[in-house]
């Protein structure tokens, strides 16, 4: 069941404290965050699932910080930036946990990641990205409870971060709810700007799409695609009747 | 190969395009022997379905011979004669497991747009806009059929294309519409719209035991065809449909109503004009005239079954009538896979010959003329089959 959801946009929640401190600071100081965040987002959209999840979270958070002058909120609480996505996958919970936990087999479902070398709780990841080139990072599983939860921390990458995946069985034979959360832990510093916070939601959308693709490969055995199919001439007759915005 | 492509409102062309290739291990390639223009293709032709792109290959009713098989395909081999459902289903998700094939989670390659419009994405559909996945359609010499193990069926060589082709869509669609009516002994079913789906809904309602079927349209040839199937007919341009249906049912109203018209109803009177104006300026995406009449006409506690396609927003629908009469609404794209084998059997045992609905057979190259003729209901046109 395609029940992928994202949590409510955190910038819709404004606490009294935030209103008081939300004033933008020097915009020149925010640009490194926005540019850096955008780069992370680009990298995230071109990388594999785990890596994409991690990078996109950090990218969004960094842009958000640049734009808003504070880190995004979760449940009205000030704290490190956090992204989450949930999807229900029509497979047994143990299978999903074991697949996720066996990082090397997990990687086989994520073609955009070149390789994962796992040794116990530690792993080394490599992805080559068309624009950003080859990127590497280390990850360490910090906590696991079969078949319900895995937590990890990524180090030596562009931005340190930690993440978790939770597997939950809803009542009534509906598959397994898989929820991924990623929290970036970038270096601190006070910044601000006036750029729309909406940008920060893009990576969460990407993270959710990665999760849907993961579900699709597990359920259907392949990713539905139309890339490479024939079509006629794509002439710009679109504007003439304007009916196909 | 040659293919029928969309280039804008009232602009379809036959173009030379590359042959389709296997893109996923679950694909097969079909050499098309017969394909048809569906009434719902006219919504594309008339420019009412968003997210079409110039060059998109049209068509979701097609059959033919398997000429290439992906490495994961188990049920088909080269040379098999197949019909393919118009919706594409993975066979493995929550919805497919519950036989709700047209609601498959996994076959729309671009689910975001549909999620934005509908909350969640339905299954992918051949040749029916990028909202529905952007799959190349089957009004062509060849088509790629993805997730082949979960859609097409093999059909016997002994039966002609004309009897089998409509298993892809309009026969199951009409049948599901009638099945949704949960027809009981003595029931009257009113069918709004006697186009191809309406014709199959009429036949199916009788197959499922309806006492009386009333067909509502304005095109004489369609009403004639409905009458030949045993329906009573109503020309809505010279009758008050709701009153006439009341008269035909002892003042009770039809036990169920089938809206086989959908989003482009030719409404009469003030509301018809208002709907056209609103649709023209995009305040309203769909013109729900038949739906309004069906709600009004249906008896208390009756069922409204909607096979006619809606794409978006409708106005001035009398929800109060639907609520206070306790109507049941059943609708949606057809779960074609549920009907392929049973209806093939009905054809085989002679209870129905779906070729009755065909009025024109044309070469694929004449698709632009065929679309125009079908839209304008010229030359008695009810259903066009194209031969590649």
Image: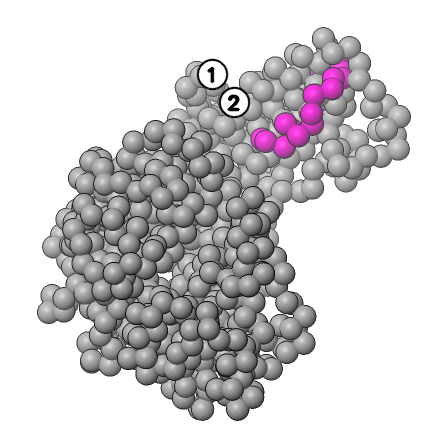
User: Which range is magenta?
Assistant: A187-203
Residue placed most toward the observer, A176 or B120: B120
**Residue at point 38%, 32% (across, down):** A237
- Nearer the observer, A164 or B356: B356
Q: Nearer the viewer, mark 2 or mark 1?
A: 2
Q: Position of residue B162 (x, y in %)?
A: 18, 65
Is mark 2 in CB contact (under 8 Å) with mark 1? yes
**Which of the chains bears the disc numbered 2?**
A
Q: Is residue A69 above or below residue B177?
A: above
Residue B75 visible at all: no
Q: Is residue B201 above or below residue B317?
A: below
**Residue positioned 59% across, 31% down in the render:** A202
Residue displayed at 58% across by 60% down: B271
Number of marks: 2
For residue B299, what is the image quadrant? bottom right
Q: Check if residue B362 falls in the magenta segment.
A: no
**Can you identify the residue that label 1 sits on?**
A132
Instruction: Report which residue position mark 2 lands on.
Output: A42
SS category of the residue bearing label 1: loop
Residue at horizontal 47 percent and vertical 16 percent from the top:
A132
Mark toward the start of the polypeptide (2 vs 1)? 2
């Amino acid at each position: 069941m395609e029940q992928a959801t994202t949590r409510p946009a955190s910038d819709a929640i404004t606490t009294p404290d935030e209103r008081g401190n939300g004033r933008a600071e020097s915009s020149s100081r925010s640009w490194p965050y926005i540019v850096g965040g955008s780069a992370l987002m680009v990298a995230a959209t071109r990388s594999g699932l785990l890596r994409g999840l991690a990078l996109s979270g950090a990218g969004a958070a960094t842009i958000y910080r640049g734009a808003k002058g504070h880190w995004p909120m979760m449940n009205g609480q000030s704290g490190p930036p956090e992204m989450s996505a949930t999807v229900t996958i029509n497979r047994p919970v143990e299978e999903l946990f074991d697949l996720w936990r066996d990082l090397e087999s997990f990687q086989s479902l994520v073609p955009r990641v070149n390789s994962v070398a796992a040794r116990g709780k530690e792993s080394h990841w490599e992805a080559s990205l068309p624009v950003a080139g080859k990127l590497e990072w280390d990850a360490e599983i910090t906590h696991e409870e079969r078949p319900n939860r895995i937590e990890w921390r990524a180090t030596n990458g562009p931005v340190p971060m930690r993440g978790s995946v939770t597997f939950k069985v809803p009542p009534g034979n509906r598959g397994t709810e898989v929820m991924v959360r990623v929290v970036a832990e970038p270096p601190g510093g006070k910044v601000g700007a006036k750029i729309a916070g909406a940008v920060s939601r893009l990576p969460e959308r990407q993270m959710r799409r990665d999760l849907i693709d993961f579900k699709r490969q597990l359920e259907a055995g392949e990713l539905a695609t139309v890339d490479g199919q024939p079509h006629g001439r794509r002439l710009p007759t679109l504007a003439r009747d304007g009916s196909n915005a | 190969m040659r293919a029928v492509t969309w280039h804008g409102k009232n602009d379809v062309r036959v173009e030379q395009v590359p042959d389709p290739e296997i893109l996923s291990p679950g694909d097969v390639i079909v050499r098309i022997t017969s394909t048809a223009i569906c009434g719902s293709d006219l919504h594309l032709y008339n420019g009412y379905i968003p997210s079409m792109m110039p060059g998109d290959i049209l068509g979701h009713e097609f059959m033919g011979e398997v000429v290439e098989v992906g490495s994961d395909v188990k049920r088909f081999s080269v040379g098999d004669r197949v019909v393919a459902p118009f919706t594409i289903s993975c066979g493995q998700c929550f919805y497919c497991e519950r036989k709700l094939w047209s609601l498959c989670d996994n076959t729309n390659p671009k689910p975001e747009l549909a999620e934005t419009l509908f909350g969640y994405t339905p299954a992918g559909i051949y040749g029916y806009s990028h909202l529905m996945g952007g799959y190349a359609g089957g009004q062509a010499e060849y088509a790629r059929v993805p997730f082949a193990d979960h859609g097409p069926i093999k059909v016997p060589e002994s039966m002609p294309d004309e009897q089998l082709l409509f298993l892809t869509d309009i026969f199951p669609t009409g049948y599901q519409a009638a099945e949704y009516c949960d027809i009981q002994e003595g029931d009257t079913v009113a069918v709004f719209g006697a186009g191809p789906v309406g014709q199959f809904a009429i036949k199916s309602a009788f197959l499922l035991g309806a006492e009386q079927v009333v067909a509502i349209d304005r095109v004489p040839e369609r009403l004639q065809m409905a009458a030949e199937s045993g329906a009573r007919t109503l020309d809505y341009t010279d009758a008050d449909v709701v009153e006439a249906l009341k008269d035909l049912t002892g003042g009770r109203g039809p036990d169920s109503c089938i809206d086989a018209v959908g989003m482009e109803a030719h409404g009469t009177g003030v509301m018809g004009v208002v709907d056209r104006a609103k649709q023209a300026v995009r305040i309203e995406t769909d013109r729900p005239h038949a739906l309004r009449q069906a709600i009004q006409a249906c008896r208390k506690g009756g069922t409204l079954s909607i096979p006619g396609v809606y794409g978006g927003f409708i106005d001035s629908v009398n929800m109060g009538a639907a609520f206070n009469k306790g109507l049941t609404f059943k609708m949606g794209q057809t779960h074609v896979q549920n009907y392929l084998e049973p209806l093939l059997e009905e054809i085989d045992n002679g209870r129905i010959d779906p070729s009755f609905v065909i009025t024109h057979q044309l070469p694929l190259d004449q698709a632009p003329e065929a679309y125009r003729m079908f839209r304008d209901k010229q030359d008695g046109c009810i259903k066009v089959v194209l031969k590649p």
